[in-house]
Image: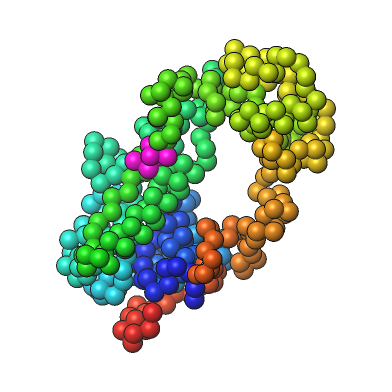
Amino acid sequence: MSGPLQGIRVLEMVGIGPAPFCGMMLADMGAEVIRVDRPADKRAGLDGKPRAQDSLRFDVTARGKRTVAIDLKSAEGVQQVLALVEQVDVLIEGFRPGVMERLGLGPEVCLRRNAKLVYGRMTGWGQHGPLAHAAGHDINYISISGMLGAMGRAEEAPVPPLNLVGDYGGGAMMLAFGVACALVEARNSGAGQVIDAAMTDGAALLGSMLYGMQAQGVWSAQRGTNLLDGSAHFYDTYECADGKYIAIGSIEPQFYAALLERLELTDPDFSRQMDKEQWPRLKRRLAALFTTRTRAQWTELMEGTDICFAPVLDMEEAPYHPHNIARNTFIEVDGVTQPAPAPRFSRTAPEVRHAPGRPEERVDDVLEGWLSGSR
């Protein structure tokens, strides 16, 4: 076992979305994560159907964790969870506000059992507010943060950025950061606390720089007219002759100059880099130019230079890019290719200890191991 969180015990209440991803990050960093799942006959996937045992190995966010099956609607099950709570450092849950309280596992109950417990709560809208009890998904949470409205082309609908900004960036990663902060504070104070991680809050926080630029008057509320939203000819993706794409990010003057030099663009119009009125016309000219060669040809010409260039790879291609191979950015666990733990540490290197979907363990066996003093 390795990683900077070695010796930390985490209890994860199984759910979907960002809470399991947060648990995966903690497990990757060396924490011992125990998932509390429903009994086998009560489990279902996203489609509402029972989950096949073989499909569990594709649940990458469950990697490195152990699982116990507990019926949370029974008094015995609640007592089993509380027995685990007494032995862990962290509990994370992703239910709607009030669910854990109704189960008899709310923060007050758990903190009475374990005063040093870090109790992490992950929701979309937060634990309070007019929308706190409403259903929602990533696309809804990033909508009220202002972030979704900033993504997309001018005169076109906003483009959902998969579930990366709300669920994972503004949700799971904020909760993981909160857990790490609370663990450090608990070492000093001897007291645990509750973390209210809301995806709406986290997504808004991710936009801090943009809100600053807006206040400065250098970022427009009009989607598709700004420096980083794809409207600038020097910061966008372009289709190549083979239908594949490349990404250009030549913002700084020296990088932009490198782009013009490599493309042999001497037209004076291109010297007016920050003239927004020129952007649409210059973009059309670059778009026409990039269709004259394949993605591989443009990559050979520009990759590794100060142009700020990269080929746009799909998820089948990304693991085989030479840079990703050199850094072991992707690993294979039980035949499933997936991203490796990040970030890197010089001394306490994180690792994936085992694949997801391991056979369930008995609560008594977990407790016996913990009570024997092994961390």
Magenta run includes residue 153:
no
How many discs mark residues in the rendered view? 0
Identified at 54% across, 66% down, the residue is 346
Vertically, is 369 above or below 195? below
Magenta span includes 202: yes
Which is more toward the observer, 342 or 107?
342
Give me the residue at 65% from left, 23% from top: 233
- Point 66% across, 31% down: residue: 254
Q: Quadrant of residue 67?
A: bottom left
* Residue 76 image offset from top left, x and y in percent: 24, 73
Percent x, y of residue 87: 29, 75
Residue farthest toward the top in the current orientation of the protein = 277
Q: Position of residue 270 (x, y in %)?
A: 70, 18
- Main SS, magenta region, reads helix
Task: Depth check: give the residue in front, 53 or 192.
Answer: 192
Instruction: Work out whether 116 lies above or below 246.
Output: below
Query: Which residue is painted at 63% across and 20% down in the image?
Result: 273
Classify the position of the C terminus by image quarter.
bottom left
Q: Residue furthest front?
A: 254
Q: Is residue 138 visible?
A: no
Q: Nearer the viewer, residue 184 or 59?
A: 184
Q: Judge from the rendering whether residue 253 lies leftward or rightward of residue 185; answer left or right.
A: right
Residue 360 seen in the current view: yes
Q: x and y percent of residue 280 in the render?
A: 64, 16
Which range of residues does the magenta coloring cover?
Answer: 201-206
In this orientation, which residue lies closer to the viewer: 177 or 138?
177
Q: Say which quarter of the image contains residue 82.
A: bottom left
